[in-house]
């Protein structure tokens, strides 16, 4: 039935993380989704029986590796697993490689079990690896990813029972991360206001007053920037500068991007671009743009955008006065020097040109550096008003004739969504960044041309023709009236005889007496200089007849409604500033799935763990306020949830949850990991241990060197003592 089928889908999502339709879906009745990979169809990473086999494999590895490495420690805890170890049939199963879901897992032979770590199959997908990481947390294994992300099947999971076992993995490096301690976002920083605040009483909490003062500083600065932008929304014509924004249609007619290109990133071409990776270069960049009196700046940024709760600006690209600037914000000292751009970005006489700035550009510049775009031209808004078929930046470059559009499109596909935290920056990454800002200045001119041509350039020709017709008709009527009244029209007749022209033609020739603005001026005569050298007065008049005005001033552009609409929408996009989103800890997918698994009895979870989870979330907020950063930089909610499941007792058992801890937790000098473990320890009595919990964690905190010493050295007792003391101290 329909309800039963829906329950089956829910169970499939719960067990495998996706939707797997039953065999009855898409049957002859026509109900349900059809078979195949249609819309809404999503295979689970693992079937339920595959998950059970992988969990059993990880359990077997932990138990057998402990038995091989520490043969003298067969205590009661090990006897609890005796049914697994003593069953010869099951041991024979794992003596050979195991195939689970088309993935071959290594045999659990003694030589593999005695090694410092175990490699899991490299054929696992990213989603499958994520699920296995969660299983390793439940089982109590140290685990992390290793291998090259850029190579097909280059990534794998390595696991170990030893807290130092993963250190033996060759070329193992920490995951890419933002250096958060030196890249504090402006919106969250707590050092905007001087420590010595006036008016603080002795009974007041200085830290709270400072926090309030810094928040007020951010709010006031944001309000000031918002007011400057809103003033331009009300008067979009002010965004056009009289000295810079006149347009010459005859000059722009036929112009495109075919003659422009991004120069190669070579030493010879250093005058065409600059990599800004030091504070000194940042100051030089601002100085060059200021000294060149640039009236327009092309702008783009590249971000790390894991979620709306965890973002960071990784690269800023500028183009001004025929030079590209690639600003590496993650380079030492550069982050704090980016504020030098503030006078340029807040100057309404300098147009900042970007593409779809409301996406990440405006919020990121506001959040990380306190920068506001005052007087912006968004080429994406112009593309929408022009109804262009391709409205992304690469599509605009192709539309306007960029010869290297294929190269640009290829770079965009490869690097638009890459991890921009990666350093060092490669040559293709830099070249892609330059492409994003290099052509924006010329594209703005071409788009203004296309927006206004119909009502200015094309209309000027039709207006002149219409005006000539009106003047000709009036003159012809005058001549007919004079003839009917018996006036002397011999002059007109002789003129007609000499030139073979009618009265209408004479009147049209008379209408060619125009000024430079293209308007008819009665009584004005052509000067001798205007016809000198022509040899024919008629041909000179015909030449002037087809001449039309091509230069239009900023004042005339301000009367164009389409252009004003684009400018107004561009300013509105600059108001989409950062608004600190607050994560709903009890509404995340991971927490809801945990409750569902607890309801089905597949996970040990109770109200005590929920209370602990809420305490840890509050602790994370306090740490973020103290360090002047956003909560996601301290740690993720998923990590806190895993900690509540595992209930670690010491720093090393904490690394069983996440081997590479976030920077704020990994820095022992800050002491935050000790605070976290203290909160977990104080809540242990209210929480039921999961999968052995504290007992498993204590038993597994052993080193690989200790195992070697146990076979013939004297450092084993020292290592075991250090680990035991550390666990006991943190447990208290």
Image (cartoon, rainbow, N blue to C red):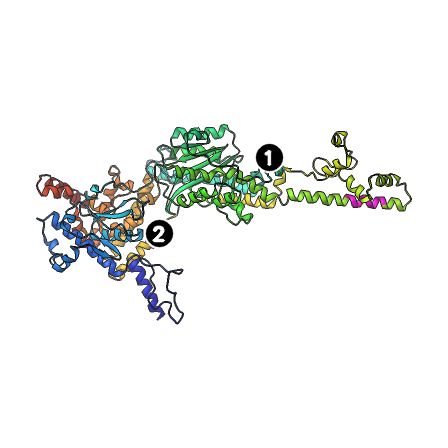
Q: Measured along the vertical axis of the image, is residue 130 above or below residue 536?
A: below
> Secondary structure beneath disc 2?
loop
Magenta residues span 471-479
Q: Residue beneath label 2, please? A: 584
Q: Quadrant of the N terminus?
A: bottom left
Q: Residues within 10 Å of mark 1 (few under 14, many from 20)?
A: few
Seen from the viewer's position, the closer of residues 672 and 350 is 350
Kindly give the residue lying farthest to the front in the view shown: 535
Q: State the image coordinates of residue 618 (x, y, percent, origin top left).
A: 30, 47
Q: Residue at x 51, y 34 (%)?
A: 347
Q: State the image coordinates of residue 278 (x, y, percent, origin top left).
A: 38, 30
Q: State the image coordinates of residue 78 (x, y, percent, origin top left).
A: 12, 54
Q: Main secondary structure of the magenta part?
A: helix
Q: Is residue 644 magenta?
A: no
Dot placed on the residue nearer the N-terminal end, 2 or 1: 1
Residue 215 appears in the rendering: yes
Image-based side of 105 in relation to 464, left or right: left
Q: Is residue 473 magenta?
A: yes
Judged by depth in the image, the label closer to the viewer, 2 or 1, is 1
Seen from the viewer's position, the closer of residues 581 and 311 is 311
User: Cα distance, mark 2 to mark 1?
Assistant: 50 Å
């Amino acid at each position: 039935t329909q309800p039963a089928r829906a329950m089956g889908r829910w169970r499939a999502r719960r067990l495998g993380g996706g939707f797997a339709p039953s065999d009855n879906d898409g049957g002859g009745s026509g109900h349900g989704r059809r078979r195949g990979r249609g819309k809404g169809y999503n295979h689970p990473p693992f079937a339920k029986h595959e998950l059970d086999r992988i969990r059993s494999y990880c359990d077997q590895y932990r138990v057998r590796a402990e038995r091989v490495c520490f043969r003298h420690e067969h205590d009661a805890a090990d006897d609890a697993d005796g049914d697994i170890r003593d069953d010869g049939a099951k041991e024979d199963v794992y003596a050979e490689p195991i195939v689970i879901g088309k993935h071959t897992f290594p045999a659990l032979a003694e030589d593999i079990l005695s090694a410092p770590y175990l490699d899991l199959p490299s054929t696992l997908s990213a989603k499958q690896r994520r699920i296995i990481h969660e299983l390793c947390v439940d089982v109590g294994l140290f685990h992390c990813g290793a291998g090259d992300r850029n190579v097909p099947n280059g990534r794998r999971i390595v696991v170990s029972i030893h807290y130092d076992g993963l250190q033996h993995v060759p070329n193992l490096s920490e995951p890419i991360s933002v250096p958060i301690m030196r890249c504090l976002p402006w919106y969250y920083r707590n050092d905007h206001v001087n420590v010595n605040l006036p008016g603080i009483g002795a009974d007041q909490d200085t830290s709270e007053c400072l926090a309030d003062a810094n928040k007020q500083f951010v709010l006031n600065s944001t309000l000031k920037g918002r007011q400057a932008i809103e003033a331009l929304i009300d008067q979009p014509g002010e965004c056009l500068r009289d000295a810079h924004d006149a347009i010459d249609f005859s000059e722009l007619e036929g112009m495109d991007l075919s003659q422009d290109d991004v120069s190669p990133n070579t030493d010879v071409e250093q005058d065409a671009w600059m990599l800004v990776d030091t504070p000194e270069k940042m100051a030089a960049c601002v100085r060059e743009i200021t000294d060149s009196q640039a009236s327009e700046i092309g702008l783009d940024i590249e971000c790390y955008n894991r979620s709306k709760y965890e973002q960071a600006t990784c690269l800023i690209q500028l183009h001004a006065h025929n030079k590209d600037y690639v600003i590496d914000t993650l380079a030492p000292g550069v982050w704090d020097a980016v504020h030098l751009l503030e006078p340029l970005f807040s100057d309404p006489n300098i147009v900042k040109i970007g593409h779809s700035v409301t996406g990440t550009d405006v919020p990121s510049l506001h959040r990380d550096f306190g920068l506001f775009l005052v007087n912006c031209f968004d080429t994406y808004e112009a593309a929408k008003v022009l109804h262009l078929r391709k409205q992304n930046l690469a599509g605009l470059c192709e539309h306007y004739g960029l010869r290297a559009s294929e190269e640009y499109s290829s770079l965009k596909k490869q690097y638009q969504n890459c991890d921009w935290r990666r350093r060092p920056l490669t040559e293709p990454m830099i070249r892609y960044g330059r492409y994003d800002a290099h052509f924006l200045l010329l594209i703005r001119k071409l788009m203004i041309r296309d927006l206004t041509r119909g009502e200015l350039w094309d209309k000027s020709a039709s207006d002149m023709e219409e005006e000539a017709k009106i003047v000709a008709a009036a003159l012809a009527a005058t001549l007919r009236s004079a003839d009917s009244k018996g006036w002397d029209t011999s002059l007109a007749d002789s003129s007609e005889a000499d030139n073979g022209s009618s009265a209408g033609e004479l009147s049209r020739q008379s209408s060619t007496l125009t000024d430079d603005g293209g308007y008819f001026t009665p009584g004005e005569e052509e000067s001798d200089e205007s016809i000198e050298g022509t040899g024919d007065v008629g041909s000179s008049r015909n030449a002037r007849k087809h001449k039309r005005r091509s230069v239009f001033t900023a004042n005339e552009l301000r009367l164009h409604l389409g252009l004003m609409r684009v400018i107004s929408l561009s300013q509105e996009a600059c108001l989409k500033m950062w608004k600190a989103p607050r994560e709903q800890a009890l509404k995340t997918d991971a927490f809801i799935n945990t409750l569902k698994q607890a309801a089905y009895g597949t996970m040990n979870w109770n109200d005590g763990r929920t209370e602990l989870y809420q305490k840890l979330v509050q602790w994370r907020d306090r740490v973020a306020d103290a360090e002047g950063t956003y909560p996601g930089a301290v740690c993720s909610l998923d990590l806190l949830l895993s900690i509540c499941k595992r209930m670690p007792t010491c720093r090393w058992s904490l690394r069983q949850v996440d081997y590479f801890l976030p920077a704020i937790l990994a820095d022992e000098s800050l002491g935050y990991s000790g605070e976290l473990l203290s909160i977990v320890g104080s809540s242990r009595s209210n929480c039921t241990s999961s999968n052995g919990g504290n007992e498993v964690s204590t038993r597994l905190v052993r080193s690989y060197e200790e195992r070697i010493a146990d076979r013939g050295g004297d450092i084993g007792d020292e290592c075991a003592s250090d680990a035991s003391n550390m666990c006991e101290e943190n447990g208290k």
